[in-house]
Amino acid sequence: MKKEKIKDGAPTKYKEEYNDQVRKLCLLGSTDKDIASFFGVTETTINNWKLEYPNFFESIKEGKEYADANVADRLYQRALGFEHDSEEIKIVEGNIKRIPVRKVYPPDPTSAIFWLKNRKAVAWRDKQENEQPEKPIAIDYSKLTDEQLQTLRELLEIAKKNE
């Protein structure tokens, strides 16, 4: 006779309608901790739901990916600059007038730098690393004059001060 596996613990609080709610929460930038708080459960429970309910997990991924893609798109637009049509509402001779305008937003250097540092990190990192030879280079100082040695000492002291 085969025994049925009995699940330990309280029945799940998960409901199918959570899928849509969690997707919307992710669109707002919610983390797993925020999601757990919203549903009144622990992060461990959220992680268990991701494993037990594939639609729940897909809703989280969908919401986060969509939100991240939109933010990346806006950041990209800010980095390059953009323009759009709008309208201003003015009162002219006692009448309300809608005046079409074209708004222009110049490129934003901070957005461009942020984008490049993240997308092209090697080329745009703040600190450029100098390649050092694997072995120290042996220099024969015996052929230098006293004057050349003194100049070398002075240069080394200046270099130490500037470190």
Image (cartoon, rainbow, N blue to C red):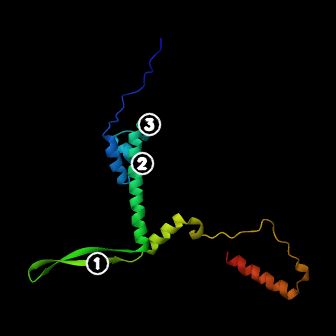
Number of numbered discs overlaid on the protein picture: 3
Q: Earlier in the sequence, mark 2 or mark 1?
A: 2
Which residue is found at the position 47% from the left and 14% from the top?
A: 2
Distance from label 2 to label 1 (Cα)? 37 Å
In the displayed orientation, state which residue is furthest to the bottom: 147
Q: Are marks 2 and 1 in contact (CB under 8 Å)?
A: no
Is residue 126 at least partly visible in the picture? no
Instruction: Judge the density around disc 3: few (<14), some (14-19), many (≥20) Cα neighbours within 10 Å.
Output: few
Q: Are marks 2 and 3 in contact (CB under 8 Å)?
A: no
Q: Nearer the viewer, residue 30 or 101?
A: 101
Q: Which residue is mark 2?
A: 61
The percent coordinates of residue 108 (x first, y second) are 42, 74
Distance from label 2 to label 3 (Cα)? 15 Å
Q: Which residue is mark 1?
A: 102
Q: Nearer the viewer, residue 89 or 154?
A: 89
Which residue is found at the position 28% from the left and 78% from the top?
A: 102
Which residue is found at the position 61% from the left and 69% from the top?
A: 127
The percent coordinates of residue 161 (x first, y second) are 69, 78
Q: Give amino acid for label 1.
A: Arg
Viewer-side label of 3, 1: 1
Q: Earlier in the sequence, mark 3 or mark 1?
A: 3
The correct choice, above or below, for 130 with respect to 45 in the image is below
As drawn, the label of residue 48 is 3
Q: Give amino acid for label 3.
A: Asn
Instruction: Judge the density around disc 1: few (<14), some (14-19), many (≥20) Cα neighbours within 10 Å.
Output: few
The percent coordinates of residue 131 (x first, y second) are 71, 69
Find numbered disc 1 in the image and state the secondary structure of the residue it sits on.
Answer: strand
Is residue 157 at least partly visible in the picture? yes
The correct choice, above or below, for 133 with respect to 149 in the image is above
Compared across the picture, whether 42 is left or right of 85 comes to right
Q: Quadrant of residue 52?
A: top left
In the displayed orientation, state which residue is furthest to the top: 1
